[in-house]
Image: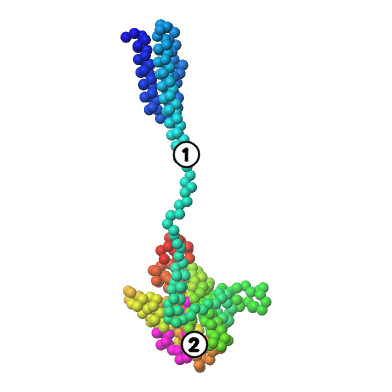
């Protein structure tokens, strides 16, 4: 084989090996180095080109065409690989800089009423189903409605049981000190209801429940809150007795707590009822749980509202809505209801 044929074979090998190597390169920097090695001034291709002048004239044309063809193959391979690596680099950069602007709605989540509000509404439903109407009144009350009309004059020792929050009335004309307060119970609504019935001429019979928010100077703990909720029941009619009160409480107990539970009354004392009693609800384990107080409306309260105690009698029953929710849902600490921990609220 002559020198001419050996060069042709070498050129073919250079092109084939170079193209194969270029196709395996995965980095633009390495591609630049390989391109310089195959096509640069120090490459074997450059040496062969320089050696053409030493060959016979009749071989220069053929070898020149072969040399140019090999160079073209290598240059095309370099360009194809560069474009491919450029596209990969752009893709990686876009992936790294990508922002997901898709609006993901996901599953629609509806909120629900707070557990205290749920309990409030459930109690109203029970009493309305028993024939009562719902009454409400202001949370800022006068001393007369909150205490005096309920047989609690200024010197009454039971006033200390309520830890009242009085409002500053210095800038109010005609309002003496300690005459405005945040109501300590919802009993003032009962007073207003009886007075309105007398003034409007509709008069008794009265069958109302009075739910609402109340305030006391209490330190928050597992069983007490300074702001809590009560619901009270009032019935005024002819010939109302303790038997009617006990029967009404028993009907409420079975309607709200379930037919397997029952109620009992224990003698107690409240200034606005006489006789008075505490209400206990039986528990599945055989124990009894106190839920509120009740009694026959005191004659002094009826008189303060313009009702003749010789003609009318009544009974009342009151308890804490928060405590009832605590019992119903097995919550150990009343403060959980006001901590606004969404993990707790979602369970109820």
Residue 25 lies, in percent from the top left, at 40, 28
Q: Residue at x 60, y 73 (%)?
A: 167
Residue that carries the numbered disc 1 in the rendered image: 94
Look at discs 1 and 2 and give the one toward the viewer: 1
> Is 93 above or below relative to 81?
below
Which part of the image, by quadrant, shows the N terminus? top left
| x and y percentages locating residue 198 in the rendered image | 56, 87
Q: Which mark is residue 205?
A: 2
Q: Secondary structure at mark 1?
A: helix
Split into 4 quadrants, where in the image is the C terminus? bottom left
Q: Which residues are magenta?
A: 231-247
Q: Is residue 162 visible?
A: no
- C-alpha distance separating marks 1 and 2: 79 Å
Packing grade of label 1 (10 A; few <14, some 14-19, many >=20) is: few
- Residue under the image location 51 percent in, 91 percent down: 309
Give 68 or 254, whichever is nearer the viewer.
68
Is residue 92 in the magenta section? no
User: Residue 77: image x %, image y %?
Assistant: 41, 25
Query: Does residue 219 appear to the left or right of 264 in the view shown?
Result: right
Drawn side of residue 111 relative to residue 174, left or right: left
Question: Can residue 348 be seen?
Answer: yes
Which type of secondary structure does the marked residue at label 2 adopt? loop
User: Where 145 falls versus 47 (above or below)?
Assistant: below
Task: Kindly identify the residue that appears in the image at 47 percent across and 62 percent down.
Answer: 340
Near-viewer residue (12 or 117): 12
Question: Which one is nearer the viewer's eye here, 129 or 248?
Answer: 129
Residue 177 lies, in percent from the top left, at: 63, 76
**Residue 243 lies in the magenta-colored region:** yes
In primary-sequence order, the first of circles 1 and 2 is 1
């Amino acid at each position: 084989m002559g020198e001419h044929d050996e060069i042709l074979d070498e050129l073919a090998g250079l092109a084939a090996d170079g193209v194969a190597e270029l196709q395996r390169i995965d980095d633009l920097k390495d591609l630049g180095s390989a391109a310089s090695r195959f096509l640069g001034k120090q490459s074997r291709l450059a040496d062969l080109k320089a050696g053409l002048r030493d060959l016979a004239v009749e071989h220069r044309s053929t070898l020149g065409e072969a040399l140019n063809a090999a160079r073209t193959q290598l240059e095309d391979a370099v360009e194809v690989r560069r474009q491919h690596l450029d596209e990969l680099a752009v893709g990686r950069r876009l992936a790294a800089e990508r922002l997901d602007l898709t609006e993901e709605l996901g599953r629609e989540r509806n909120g629900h009423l707070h557990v205290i509000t749920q309990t409030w509404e459930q109690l109203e439903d029970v009493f309305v189903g028993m024939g009562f109407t719902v009454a409400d009144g202001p949370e800022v009350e006068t001393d007369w409605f909150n205490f005096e009309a309920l047989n609690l004059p200024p010197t009454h020792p039971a006033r200390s049981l309520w830890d009242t929050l009085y409002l500053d009335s210095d800038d109010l004309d005609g309002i003496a000190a300690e005459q405005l307060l945040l109501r300590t119970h919802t009993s003032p609504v009962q007073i207003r209801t009886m007075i309105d019935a007398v003034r409007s001429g509709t008069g008794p019979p009265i069958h109302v429940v009075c739910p609402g928010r109340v305030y006391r100077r209490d330190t928050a703990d597992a069983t007490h809150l300074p702001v809590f909720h009560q619901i009270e029941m009032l019935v005024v009619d002819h010939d109302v007795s303790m038997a009617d009160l006990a029967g009404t409480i028993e009907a409420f107990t079975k309607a709200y707590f379930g037919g397997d539970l029952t109620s009992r009354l224990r003698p107690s004392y409240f200034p606005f009822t006489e006789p008075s009693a505490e209400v206990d609800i039986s528990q599945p384990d055989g124990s009894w749980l106190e839920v509120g107080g009740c009694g026959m409306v005191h004659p002094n309260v009826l008189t303060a509202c313009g009702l003749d105690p010789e003609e009318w009698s009544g009974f009342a029953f009151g308890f804490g809505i928060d405590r009832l929710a605590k019992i119903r849902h097995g919550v150990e600490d009343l403060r959980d209801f006001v901590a606004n921990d969404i993990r707790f609220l979602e369970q109820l």
